[in-house]
Image: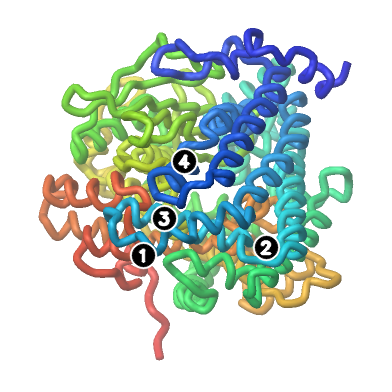
Amino acid sequence: MTVMETALSDPSPAANPLVADWTTPFGLPPFAEIRPEHFLPAFDAALAAHRAEIAALVEDTAPPRFETTLLGLENSGRQLDRVANVFFNLAAADTSDALQAIERDIAPRLAAHHAAIFTDARLFARIDALEADRDRLDAEAKRLLQRTRLAFIRAGARLAPEAKARMNAIVERLATLGTWFAQNVLADEASWTLELKTEDDRAGLPEFVIEAALRAGEERGRPGAALITLQRSSIEPFLTFSARRDLRRLAFEAWTHRGQSGGATDNRALIAEMVALRLERARLLGYPTFAAFKLDDTMARTPQAVRALLEEVWAPAKARAQRERDDLQRLAEAEGFNGTIAAWDWRHYAEKLRKARFDLDEAATKPYLALDRVIAAAFDTASRLFGLTFAERAEAPVYHPDVRAWEVTKDGRHVGLFLGDYYGRPSKRSGAWMSSFRTQQKLAGDVRPIIVNVMNFAKGEPALLSFDDARTLFHEFGHALHGLLSDVIYASLAGTDVATDFVELPSQLFEHWLSQPEVLSAFARHVATDAPMPAAMIERIKASRTFNQGFSTVEYVASALVDLALHELTDTAGLDPLAFEAAELARIGMPAEITMRHRTPHFTHVFTGDGYSAGYYSYLWSEVLDADAFAAFEESGNVFDPATAARLERFVYAAGNRRDPAEAYTRFRGRLPTTAALLKKRGLERPSV
């Protein structure tokens, strides 16, 4: 029996925990009872229920009212949301062949379902009619009406029937392609390993890298084998420390060539089709390019504004990277290397140069950054800023043994539940992210959120983090706080459901507290001796803050510029994604020794769904905000200043999408920022005129 046949074999609600009421602690899904075969019947039932709810709204003969029409729409689909939240969290964090087969089936069906709702002429007419009565609504209700109406318009509600049909077909096809894209990248990541068979293969590697490689071998059913994988927590330390240049090159090329193998997992044709369909979608809505369509509903507003920011940063970043390259080349030559350094050499020599300049290396700092200590530091920072308390709850059901759960409270009041899934495994897609099993809202009672952070750190006894790993944990926890502190009425405006180039503000801002001496001195303690990180080491960390920032900025901005250029195309005929990528990098003068942070064939931010399509610039846009926002704390003389933190919580972390993001930021800071704080943070000089 196939997966699909099995999934349809027992549709009875009594046998399906996804359809039944949940009596689990905190209202978590009953993970132990959920099997792959439960999902399709649960989706079928939830889709039918949602269609019935929408039909009732459309067929209502009474004049449309906010309380019936718009709130009816807002209250609809809760069963579908519940099933989808469980499924897509598992499909990303703990997938299987069965779940991937279901994902390929359900993703286009869900896309078609939502497209049909948001292009329904009768439903849109009822929502559109509410504009005439908007003055009687309070500010949050007006915002809900504005955002809902705009969502219908951007989905194609105003199009002619033939154009609507084509729009819906495009949306459905894009969902299929995005699913394939993500699964192809995961397959490439899971299928490649480099075995370190001899002592010579392990030359230069610290013990923590070898231990992680041995654990990777055990996890893949090869006990005793030391395996380097394509998970960032494995490949980056290997590229940093390995003395074997030939193996560094082999691993680097496998890492950067995901999605372009030429075989069944090759993503190039998918990319070409997706870019063409996105352009067609934008043109149906009257926009000249997909970038123009996508950015029209962001803080940036236009591709021109995005390009101006990226190019303003690109020039000083490239100049800085060229100086860094020259320094690395001299170091390599001083060690007896006679060639020209390449991309697989950069991390290796940069680490050596950092140690030489700052007496600081990853092997020295890791023992002070045990995972549990960094989690405690993040919790303590949230407590000092926002008054939150975290209590681990062993009784909470979780979807994998590695997942931990904490109840979050404030002044004795339940705020939400936080799940942490920190370790890499073959069943998890790469990267780090925040998601939710339940979103905060007050329309159907005081519904508290269930938020999850997912990461891919290497396991250890205990797990030790690099400083970049610790920064990633703080970053994702900033997103988690955005979801946990959400305090709005309507789920559609809750938490992280904000403009793409605003959503990274809470996460990137939270990163700043990790490097504060009062945080490091309290929580960065040696794993063996419990001695605090020496003050001199903390000072060296601070002094090295802008080290290698030319490289980091160039690899990021190059990715953002390629993303933008792809989605500014007005003619996609014959698009070869790799040739286009190469031409764009040549145009901007990409240093040969640096690659894009995310090359096009595995650029999951951009091609798994369209959340960050034409939007990878968002991290830099938000960094302009976060650098300026942290300056507000510095200007107060106290990085935990209560008054500044209260404004931050009220207007950013708790506010969701209640206001336009520019207004929200201005309410917090009193003005909008310039790029000056960003350039200072990254240590980039403005180009001379």
**Alpha-carbon span between mark 1 and mark 3:** 30 Å
Q: Disc 1 vs disc 2: which is toward the camera?
A: 1
Q: Please tell me which of labels 1 and 4 falls first in the chain.
A: 4
Amino acid at dot 2: Asn
Question: Where is residue 405 shown, x and y percent of the image?
Answer: 41, 20
Residue 256 image point, x, y percent? 70, 51
Which of the two labelled residues, at mark 2 and mark 4, occupies the earlier sequence position? 4
Instruction: Verify CB contact (< 8 Å) between mark 1 and mark 3.
Output: no
Instruction: Report x, y in % for residue 58.
Output: 58, 46
Left or right position of 418 against 305: left
Between label 1 and label 3, give the one nearer the viewer: 3
Q: Quadrant of residue 414?
A: top left
What is the quadrant of the C terminus in the image?
Answer: bottom left
Marks 2, 4: nearer the viewer: 4
Which secondary structure, mark 2? loop
Q: CA distance from mark 1 to mark 4?
A: 39 Å
Residue named by callout 4? 72
Identified by mark 1, the residue type is Val
Give residue 624's mark: 1
Residue highlighted by disc 2: 338
Q: In the image, what residue type sits under mark 3?
A: Leu
The earlier-in-sequence mark between 3 and 4 is 4
- Disc 2 to disc 3, how far (Cα)? 65 Å
Q: Nearer the viewer, mark 3 or mark 4?
A: 4
Decide: is 561 above or below 461. below
Which image quarter holds the N terminus?
Answer: top right
